[in-house]
Each structure stands twice: as C-alpha cells, then as structure tokens.
Amino acid sequence: MKEHFTSTVLGIPRIGPNRELKRATERYWSGALDAEGLETVARDLRLDSVRALQSAGLDSVPVNTFSYYDQVLDTAVMLGALPERVAAVVDPLDRYFAAARGTATIAPLEMTKWFDTNYHYLVPEIGPSTEFRLDATKVLGELREALDAGIPARPVLIGPVTFLLLSKAVGTEDSPLTRLDEIVPLYVELLEQLADAGAQWVQLDEPALVADRTAAEISTARAVYEQLSAVPRRPAILVASYFGSLGDALPALASTGIDGIAVDMVAGDDVIATVPALSRTLVVAGIVDGRNVWRTDLEAALATLASMLGSAHTVAVSSSCSLLHVPYTVDAETELDDALRSWLAFGAEKVAEVVALATALSHGRERVERALEESRDAQSSRAHDPRLSNPAVRERLRTIGSGATRAPAAHRRVQQEAALPLPVLPTTTIGSYPQTSAIRVARAALRSGEIDDAEYRARMRSEIVDIIALQEKLGLDVLVHGEPERNDMVQYFAERLDGFFATSSGWVQSYGTRCVRPPILFGDVTRATPMTVDWITYAQSLTDKPVKGMLTGPVTILAWSFVRDDRPLADTARQVALAIRDETVDLEAAGVRIVQVDEPALRELLPLRSADQGAYLDWSVDAFRVATSGIADSTAIHTHLCYSEFGAVIGAIAGLDADVTSIEAARSHMEVLDDLAAAGFELGVGPGVYDIHSPRVPSIDEIAASLRLALKSVPVNRLWVNPDCGLKTRGHAEVEESLRNLVEAAKLVRSET
Ligand SMILES: CN1c2c(nc(N)[nH]c2=O)NC[C@@H]1CNc1ccc(C(=O)N[C@@H](CCC(=O)N[C@@H](CCC(=O)N[C@@H](CCC(=O)O)C(=O)O)C(=O)O)C(=O)O)cc1
Ligand SMILES: N[C@@H](CCS)C(=O)O
Ligand SMILES: [Zn+2]
C-alpha cells in the first residue's frame, strides 16, 4: 500500500464564507469586474480554504473542488466535451459561462439534480461530434497553487464512469458509456501529469456507483479501475463513493489495484469486514455527516471505527461526502442560543471532528478527551431539550391516521366549476415574479433595522399592486400575488413555523451563483398563526380575477431544510403537512378558491436504490394528502413540480390527487404528458409551455405549437397554460413579453378548438 493519510474531507464549500465568489462572478457577468479581478477573488478563497484545512490538522487536503460554476462542467472542459455550439465563444472563461448559462443565441447545457441533493449540475452532451481531448490546466493549476503553499494536496476529479453515466446522448442512440474507451486513455495521461506535478494521491469520485447499477456496469467500472491502477507512473488512487452504499460495486473496486476507497458510513450501510480484499486498501471512512448539520456523536463514531480497525483494515477518517452541502461555520451564526449552537457542526466544525477522530485512532482517546466530553454534553443536551417534543401535534396526527383523502376528483370538479367558472385553456403562472434588487434591498433594510415592519409591508404591498396590475393588463385568467415577501419558498415558511430555526449566514450553493439558506428543523413542527393569508387576501382585494393561495408542500420543505435525525422523516413530514393543512383551511376561510401547494422536490428525495423507493413514495404522497385534504370539495388544490426527470415518480404524481398539476415539460417536449396518461392520471394539467431557465422570450407560434402538441395527449377541458416554473430569477421586461405571448398563444389555440 502507498503511504497513506489519516484524515481528510471529500470536498469543501467554494462560494465563499460571505458569498464572495457569487458576488464577484455576478459582477463579472455584469461587466463590473474583469477576469483578472474575478480570478483574484477565486484564488484568495481557494488558498484561504486549503490553508484552513491544513491548519485544522488534515494530512490530506482536497483541491480542485473549487469551481466557477459546477464540477461536472469543469470535467467536461477537462475532457474537451463541450458542445459545438459554444465553440464560437473565443475566450475560455466566457465559453465556460456560455455553456453554463447560455447567451442570447446559445442554449445552455441542461441543468439537473446532483443525486438526491439540492445541488444542480450541468449535463454534458455526448454525441458524434464530441472529440475528447485532455486539457488539465485547471486541476494542475490548483494542485500547483496548493503545493507551492506547502499543502498536502489531493486533486479531486469526477471519475470516468460517473462522468459518462451523468452525461446525456445527443444526436445518437448510443449511451455515453460506450465512449469509455476514448476517455480512459485521457485519465491515464492525466494521472501521469498529476504524478509529474507532485500529487501523492488523486481522488476520483464515482458516486454513480451507489445507485442501482447493472452487473455489466459494475464490471465495466472494475475494468476501468484495473486499467487506471496499472498505470506505472501515477499518484495513489482513491475512488470516492458517497450518498449511499456501493453494494456489489465495493468488492468489484476492491479487487482492482486502487489504493483507497471512500465509503459513506452515514447514508450507506456497506459492511467493510465482509470484503476481504479491502485489507489491501486504505478505507476512507466517511463517518462525519457531510450533508446534515448535527454534531457527530464522537463516542459512537469511535466505536464504529475501532471495530473496523479490529478487522485489520487501514482506516482514514473523513466526511461522508463533500462539505459543499453544508454552510462554512457555526461561528458566523450570531442569533443561536447556546444549546442549539452546541448541537451543530457546519463545515469547519466537521473538519475538527474528523481531526479529533483521527487523532483518537492514531494517538489514543486521551488526546481528545475534551472534544469527546463536549460531544457527549451536546448529545445529552439535545436529547433532553423540551423544545424537541410537542405532545399536542403528535396526538393530532394520531387522530388523523393514515390515508387522508378527498371526495372523488370528478365530483370535486363539478363543485369547483360551479364555484369558479374559468375559460377553456385557462392561463396562469407558477407563483413568483422577478425578485428584484429593490425587493431584496428592502428585506436587507428590514433586517438591519433601517426600515420598520410597517414600511417593509408597505413596500411589498406596492410590489403586489404592480404584479396584479401587470397580470390584469396581460389578461391572465388565474392570478398570483408574485411572492415578493418570500426570501425563499422554503425558508419563508420555516421562519414562521415552530420547530425550525433559520440561520443568518448559512449559505449553501444550489447552482452556479444561486444559493439557499436551508433552515434547520430541530423539533416537532407546529404553526402558531397564519403565514400567508394577509398577503393573498390583499392581492385578491385588488382584482376580480381569482388569486391563487401559494404554499410549499411538506416534502419540499423537508428536502430543502436540514432535518432532525432523531425521528423518522415520514413522521416529521406529517407534522409539516399538518401545518400546511391549517394554512389551506385559513386561506379557504378567507375566500380563496384555489390553493397551490408546490412540491418541486418530490423527485429529489426519491431514494437512489429502487428497493427503498416504494416506502418513500407512500409517505411522501400521504404527507401531501394530509396537507391538502382539509378543505371543501369546491376549493381546488393545484400543485407544481419541476427540476426532475419524473419517470419513477409518475405514479406518485397521480397519487397526489391534486385538481391541477403544473409540471416542467418544455425541455422534454411534452413527453411527460404521455407518461402521466399511462399512469392513469386524469386530472387537470399545466405542462410548462416555455423554459423559464433562460432569458429567451418564446414566440407566440412556439408556445402555440407546444399547446397543440400537448392537446394530442390531454383533452382540451383538462389543459392549463403556464410557464415551466416561477419567474423569480428572470427580469421584468422578458417576463412581460413572454407572458404576453403566452396569453396570445392560448387565445390562438382556443380559437382552433
Ligand atoms: C426552485 N429552487 C429552489 C431550491 N431550493 C430552495 N431552497 N429554494 C428554491 O427556490 N432548489 C431548486 C431550485 C433552485 N433554484 C434557485 C433559484 C434561485 C435562487 C436564488 O435566487 N437565491 C438567491 C438568494 C435567495 C434569498 O435567500 N434571498 C434573501 C437574501 C437576499 C440577499 O442576498 N440579500 C443581500 C442584500 C440585498 C441585495 O443587495 O440584493 C444580502 O443579504 O447581502 C432575500 O431575498 O431576502 C441568491 O441570490 O442566490 C436559489 C435557488
Ligand atoms: N411557487 C414557486 C415554485 C417554484 S418551484 C415559484 O413560483 O417560484
Ligand atoms: Zn418550479
């Protein structure tokens, strides 16, 4: 075995402790900062991060986990696999951003969920025109930068199998995986270049191996790593898995000549002792949770690690996955009470936990007695805190039981048409209108005390006046209030529910420069007072057209929060559902006739292994039904789904039993409609008729063509007309033009029916 290390993490956040990279990149895009200025910000952030990891005591430090946008896009650049359409952009940085975000004339790469996280990657397009060619500039640069600073740097790269499994075939039916024999030689060349540059170890990430894989795919992975490990001049190879168990891929990888395997001991349950070949390999034990924010129970972790050592393995301690998914440090949180603070570990605190565990393994637990004691105290404080348990909500849920349902859909439909007549092909939007800088500045001013609550509300009301006026002018049929008052569709609710607390600086990258501040769900969840009724009723007071109530569903609230790990997720989902149910009832009592309950993350939480999916779909559908079955038959429930390949959840979408489902469909050319029909879906549906992820304004003809296509799969009396998703990231001018065309297209197609 090559000389091994004892402590590491698989990756680190990169957006900057105060979102410095986000701000610098957005300034570069707007022309306010040049490329050199942007690179200076980036280099300073990289060096600060790796120096902090070294001084915290890690003896192997990941590098090349920095990215200007996304690590999968970086890998595509490294392999020469950008689509031909961006080649016309001469400057490499601008070409990179063109692939990520598109330009006025170039469509960007598709963006999709990174496994079951709230991070999104760009999907490489592999086809006949792809000519792979190695360009290792980025990784070699970041390696050199760290080595020059005296850091024991370990370059991190996406492995070849995962890269191709995450790519999509374009212009061919052949799976990208058939191109392995073209990219493996590039990885061989890369290993040689990294060795020459002084890398002792390299990390090749293969998270795709924790999902269900065929025997053929696993033996392909084995063959790849046999080939790579046979390279004579190379760094030691660590193959990293995360987000679940490797299962059969573990013995397959262990049988090759690789030097280390990282296993996720939080989300996975691989049993190291059952794979004898692992005794030749460094086992990098991902025992510190890289995805949630709870402090590690160090005693329990030490016991697990000791049993691995007992079975004669060489072990290094690590995070279970990259720390990209957690905020930088708890130290930045100024508004937490001491008890809550003591339960948490963000990025920096997780690194300290890794170091404490590794020190205990190498030098004995007495060296870290203080850390062990603090960990024990935190476990005990959390277990006994009265805020964690609310007997009333538990009792309420027991009485609701399972299987909450409404009357049959056909009956509801009659009631709803009588309560709220609408034209055929009703037009609507998904909820949010542009979150302008004026809105965010007002919110920042409220936080800093520069304006008071009354002034803030007045400003938001004035936004709502404008948004309602715009929709009336455009002639939309079902209006929304535009969500100006929401910092985020999950955080807004979490800030108003008991059982959650919000962070002040806990930013996590969602995609590109877009970040979220996931709230922390720590105790039983209840709703003290209505959360949205004032805003919706105000919007309704401004118009005779119906305004939709707008809520986020229980599964999405959980998916985009850090959730408690001391209760089953299914129970917590039902508690959140009850809070949303109470809100639907209050909206209805205030005269609202349509309540939309968004579940864009329904697909995201789907377990990666099919064996676990059925149980998840059961409880997630049940939670939605608990949330939406408290109202009269005459009140319509709408839902909205996006950001997904819906395949495995199509049946569940039907199971939600929402009266109308708006669903992302523009990019898949309405294919989802046939899938829904095949799953027996017979309710209202609003397939998105244009993609809101791009500033491009769709023409009337284009939208009309989408509607005609949709009408081949959905009867006219069930079809709604709406964009793919909310408009919060778009600008006012393009929104107005796009929606004008949407309304015109609906009129045109109505005249044809
Ligand atoms: C639909 N999506 C969402 C996901 N997850 C969520 N939790 N929420 C989502 O909506 N996952 C899947 C997708 C991902 N998509 C997006 C899209 C857009 C964003 C985004 O725009 N994020 C914003 C931050 C949003 C926010 O919290 N805003 C706050 C704070 C705003 C702020 O930064 N204020 C400044 C001062 C004001 C100024 O000068 O502009 C400051 O504090 O310094 C708010 O509005 O109050 C982003 O900017 O990244 C995320 C995911
Ligand atoms: N109502 C939300 C859904 C986003 S998925 C919005 O319009 O932004
Ligand atoms: Zn959406």
Image (cartoon, rainbow, N blue to C red):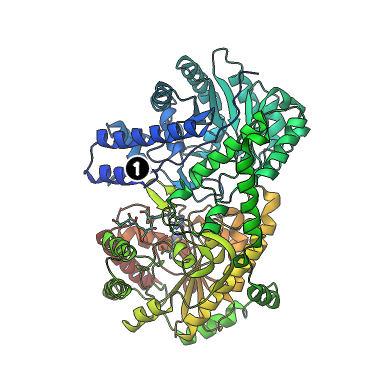
Amino acid marked by disc 1: Leu
Say which of 496 and 452 sits in front.
452
Q: Quadrant of the N terminus?
A: top right
Q: Quadrant of residue 571?
A: bottom right
Q: Position of residue 733 (x, y in %)?
A: 24, 60
Q: Decide if residue 715 is in sight here.
A: no
Q: Is mark 1 within 8 Å of ligand 1?
A: no
Residue 248 appears in the figure: yes
| Quadrant in the rendering for residue 159 | top right
Of 664 and 186, the residue lying toward us: 186
Q: Which residue is mark 1?
A: 21
In the depicted structure, whether residue 526 falls above or below residue 520: below
| Image side of residue 607 versus residue 82, left or right | right
Residue drawn at x 65%, y 49% as measured from the top left: 376
Task: Say few, some or many: other residues with alpha carbon within 10 Å of mark 1 (under 14 / 14 to 19 / 20 or more).
Answer: many
Image coords of residue 64 (percent x, y): 45, 31
Residue lying furthest top: 232
Is residue 189 placed above or below 725 in the rendered structure? above
Residue 102: image quadrant is top left
Q: Indicate the position of residue 161 as horizontal and vertical percent values.
A: 57, 32
Q: Residue at x 44, y 70 (%)?
A: 720
Q: Secondary structure at mark 1?
A: helix
Question: Residue 134, relative to residue 38: is it above or below?
Answer: above
Please count the marks in the image. Answer: 1
Answer with left or right where residue 35 lies relative to residue 163. left
Q: Residue at x 31, y 68 (%)?
A: 744
Image quadrant for the C terminus? bottom left
Is 599 on the left-hand or right-hand side of 690? right
Relative depth, front residue between 611 and 365:
365
**In the orientation shown, which residue stands out farthest toward the left?**
32
Where ligand 3 lies, by image quadrant? bottom left
